[in-house]
Image: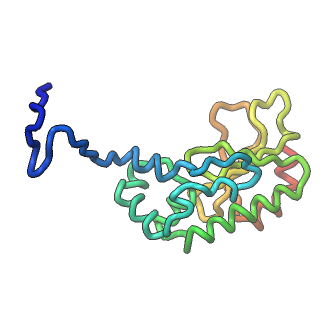
Amino acid sequence: MVQPQEGSVIGPGRSADEVQLQPVPRLEWSLATEAHPPALEAAKPASLRRSWIHTAPEPQVLELFRKLHGAKHRLPAPWWLRALDRGELPSREAAFEVEDEVHAVLRARPGWVFVPWAGTGEAGYWEYAPSDRAPMQMPTTVALTDEHNGWLNVVPAHHDPEPVPIPVKGVAGLVAMLPQIESW
């Protein structure tokens, strides 16, 4: 590697000892989805909404996501951002309402536990603790998704390496299915 001489000029008006930073798209996105400050206790989805993508003006969030070809390159992003990008949700706030409604329904029922450690920027998911029994390796899980406009998938307790998620038609569908879901 060729090192410039001390005091030499690199480019118009730049000296060799100046640091020039170039944006790195994946790093930029990583910083945008990182929680600042990190949630000390994540007992509900709202406590995880601390990153730039959750607090910056919605048009700016969408602009950065699109600039980095988010949906095309499957950037790690919350379910709602991918749905918002496709025009399937009216706003980020509407998505937060869905997350909060699901949490209110499941928190009110015995056995459901909110699990905050999901993917980058995600809202977490809920597990039904009584379903965590042998021979099952994973308990029944409710997760938010952008795969369909019901925004919820249920994965029954399983020991399969790749379980099949069951689409649920929104919070009302979840409430109607809970007796069945809790019997799995």
Residue drawn at point x = 82 percent, y = 56 percent: 106
Residue drawn at point x = 75 percent, y = 35 percent: 138
Report the side of 117 relative to 126 (left or right): left
Which residue extends farthest right? 110
**Quarter that holds the N terminus:** top left
The quarter holding residue 134 reads top right
Report the side of 146 relative to 75 (left or right): right
Front-most of residues 27 and 40: 40
Residue drawn at point x = 9 percent, y = 42 percent: 9
Front-most of residues 87 and 42: 42
Q: Pinpoint residue 5: horizontal percent, then vertical percent.
A: 9, 31
User: Where 183 falls versus 96 (above or below)?
Assistant: above
User: Where 120 falls versus 86 (above or below)?
Assistant: above
Q: Pinpoint residue 62: horizontal percent, then vertical percent.
A: 44, 64
Q: Pinpoint residue 98: horizontal percent, then vertical percent.
A: 68, 65
The quarter holding residue 158 reads top right
Front-most of residues 12 and 8: 8
The quarter holding residue 179 reads bottom right
**Quarter that holds the C terminus:** top right
Which residue extends farthest front? 7
Number of marks in picture: 0
Residue drawn at point x = 53 percent, y = 69 percent: 88
Which residue extends farthest bottom? 90
Q: Pinpoint residue 24: horizontal percent, then vertical percent.
A: 33, 45
Report the side of 138 relative to 182 (left or right): left
